[in-house]
Image: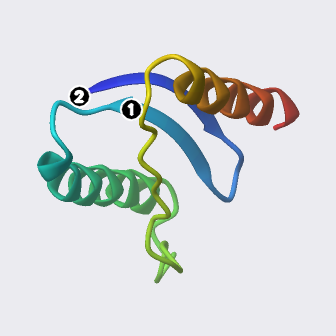
């Protein structure tokens, strides 16, 4: 897995990740969300439910145009945050 861009907007995250296979995605997203929740629980221990919804994911197909659009979107959100 390789993370290319990310933006923390306070109440949600944008992450642009390259995975070697679509079949590895479910395990990766479970691990990532679990670790984020554990880190937040350490900082805010009395928070009962951290995730209100399932992660929204989108597969970006096409390395040139689609990737550039997704990368610019994440960067724009990072700058707005």
Q: Secondary structure at mark 2?
A: loop
Instruction: Examine the image and state in which quarter residue 68 appears.
Output: top right
Identify which residue is drawn at 71% across, 46% down: 9
Identify which residue is drawn at 41% across, 47% down: 59
Q: Secondary structure at mark 1?
A: strand
Instruction: Examine the image and state in which quarter residue 18 appears.
Output: top left
Residue 4 position within the rendered picture, expressed as x and y whole percent measured from the top left: 45, 20
Is 67 above or below relative to 45?
Answer: above
Of callouts 2 and 1, the N-terminal one = 2
Residue situated in front as seen by the camera: 35 or 61: 61
Is 11 above or below relative to 54?
Answer: above
Instruction: Examine the image and state in which quarter residue 37 appears.
Output: bottom left
Q: Quadrant of the N terminus?
A: top left
Residue situated in front as seen by the camera: 39 or 62: 62
Identify which residue is drawn at 58% across, 48% down: 13
Identify which residue is drawn at 15% across, 39% down: 21
Q: Residue 66 vs residue 16: left or right? A: right
Judging by the rendered image, the residue that carries numbered circle 2 is 1
Judging by the rendered image, the residue that carries numbered circle 1 is 17
Q: Gap between marks 2 and 1, in whole Å?
A: 7 Å
Residue 39 position within the rendered picture, expressed as x and y whole percent measured from the top left: 38, 51
Residue 8 position within the rendered picture, expressed as x and y whole percent measured from the top left: 64, 40
Q: Residue 31 vs residue 63: left or right? A: left
């Amino acid at each position: 897995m390789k993370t290319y861009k990310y933006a923390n907007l306070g109440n949600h995250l944008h992450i642009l990740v390259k995975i070697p296979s679509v079949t590895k995605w479910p395990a990766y997203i479970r691990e990532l969300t679990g670790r984020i929740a554990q880190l937040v629980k350490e900082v805010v221990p009395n928070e009962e439910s951290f995730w209100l919804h399932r992660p929204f994911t989108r597969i970006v197909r096409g390395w040139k145009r689609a990737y550039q659009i997704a990368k610019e979107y994440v960067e724009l959100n990072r700058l707005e945050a």
